[in-house]
Amino acid sequence: MDTSNKIVRYGLKKAFGYIERDPEENLPKLMDWVDRFAPAGDRGFPVQRAAFRRVIEDPDCAMHQLMTRIFTETDKEVLKATFENFIINGNLVGWPRQEELREEYGCNIPWAILLDPTSACNLHCTGCWAAEYGNKLNLSFDEIDGIITQGKELGVYIYIYTGGEPLVRKDDLIALCRKHNDCQFLCFTNATLIDEDFANAMLDVKNFIPAISVEGFESATDGRRGSGVYAKVVEAMALLKRKKLPFGISCCYTSQNFESISSDEYFDQMVEWGASFVWYFHYMPIGNDAVPGLLPTPEQREFMYHKIREARREKPIFAMDFQNDGEFVQGCIAGGRRYFHINANGDCDPCVFIHYSNANIREMSLLDVLRSPIFMAYHEGQPFNDNHLRPCPMLENPVKLREMVEKTGAHSTDLQSPESAEHLCEKCAAYAQNWAPTAERLWQCSCREKQARQAEAGSESHKLAV
Amino acid sequence: MRQTTKEAIAQTFEGLLEKRNIDKITVKDIVTECGVNRQTFYYHFRDIYDLMEWALAKSIEKYAGTNLSAGMDWQEQIRLLFHFFYLHRTTVLHGYDATNRMQYERAVVKRASQMVRERIDAYPQAADVPEEKKEFIATVYARGCAGFLLEWVEEGMPDERHVRLDDYFLMIDGSIGHVLDKFRKPS
């Protein structure tokens, strides 16, 4: 890191220490610091900073309430580590480095890496893709350590565990958090292995945030995952809240559960549990045993589109829907553009949902993975659609995935029952066709809204100038 | 159970430090000698310096527990703290490098300022001095001691009588009360 970076880091850390004492009063002042030191142009996230400033200055806004909640209900040391690792390293330090390398190597450089420490899981839930994986495979401590060490060279400071149930390997994960204390770790988990000892270890390392899978209330959860699981998960969340540890929730929505897990009642419940974010995942019909009937209809997906936008305005929890929020990240983020996935066998998949690859981390470097055929096909193909409500090369543009797999000769990395790209894409063809008109209408609407907002901002700045 | 693993790692490390310099000791050396996995090392420590800091704090604590008693004169306590470093001079010297220089300083300032602090609080006028000012005064006195310690380590830690603590104590004798008076809140 060069000297100016060190000064920026020092300045931001000081500023952070200062807002801790009185967030309401001092947050706007922190923002002044960030504005002053952010790199010029797009590299300094001007849009994001402006949005953040609006949140800070409006105490009635739901996001403002969320920020206040985070500041008052999170352990101070953990909050400080998250700020340093996620905001400073993950974005302000990591991003310029990633941009530099994208240019130098002409390939995608990710912002985050998802990896499966193990294919093992302590639960056996109906329809889980991890359940299909079997439980014999693991990335060793040294392999994960190697991935992170290489990743930091590329400016990647954010690592997200999935699986399998990552916490089956919790001692190794804590060891990795401690060794790489400049990185931010997140972890998809069923939460049933979070106990007092583990919570204390999390407090000690400070850089581990769980995203707990909860898919609705008790009957829905226990029906799919086994009886008593819901109670255990709720207990784990209560423990995290008591220890002032931040966490989020992840939900998969299907044609069956979309209404219940996006209800106001459910949002309020998640806030009460103490979650600060919720990630929604559209059901994906991957695997030979997948059930296309679980795919949401266009009406159901549109319902989610509006519902999650409404929740972001009204509920003090940060909600995201990867399938419907493509507009904020310019479409598909997989293939290493913002992230990619390494499974417990070392296979490097472009996406957690797309199990086709020509690269294994046990045989090549991280950089070579990003330059392997299917990753380059992603790089060249992105965005797969100009309408960011149709971001995925599988779900909304199945022809694209079939082409890429064929062209690059990528093989199925499915550990249990390899599925051909044709078979997978066929299941999406009807969905893609049905969704297209709705996507078109919503996209036109949101483009008009955006133009109106820009025009308004333009006339305001014009007024100011006058 | 975990605690003993942690201590076993620290003991192994101290054993290695008796024999060679810190720059010749790797995590691999420690785990091989101790008979644990590399990941077990990282479960407890971030790196060798993190281990060094913990081991140092732990052994100072242990030493203080058996050798220092409440009500003991603070100057005597500081002398004993120096004596602790003298007793461990092989490992202290083997561990001395740019990073550990800071750690030694931090460890001494932390301990010594607690000792001065007790003395400060015994003064009647201490009640009228704000907490942060008392902290500051204690740190200034402690930094003086730490400076002497580092200089002494730099010289290869000859007999501890070479450290001019006597002169230092003579110089500051009686000054604490005077300094406290200056920091008293106007009443």
Image (cartoon, rainbow, N blue to C red):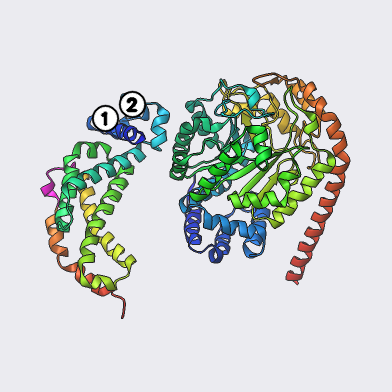
Question: Measuring 58% from the left and 46% from the top, which residue is drawn there?
Answer: A91
Circles 1 and 2: CB distance less than 8 Å?
A: yes
Tell me the residue that label 1 is attached to: B16
- Residue B52 at x, y = what percent? 31, 39
B158 is within the stretch colored magenta: yes
Q: Report x, y in % for residue A243.
A: 48, 49
Residue nearest the viewer, comparing A108 with A320: A320
Kindly indicate the quadrant of the structure image that contains residue B31. Answer: top left
Residue A421, x across and y down, in percent: 76, 22
Query: What's the mark number on residue A57?
Result: none
Q: Position of residue A8 (x, y in %)?
A: 51, 53
Q: Residues within 10 Å of mark 2 (few under 14, many from 20)?
A: some
Q: Is residue B149 above or below residue A126?
A: below
Amino acid type at circle 1 is Leu
Residue situated in front as seen by the camera: B134 or A270: A270
Quick one: quadrant of the C terminus of chain A?
Answer: bottom right
The residue at which mark 2 appears reads as B29
Instruction: Please name the amino acid that badge 2 sits on.
Output: Asp
Q: Which residues are magenta?
A: B155-163
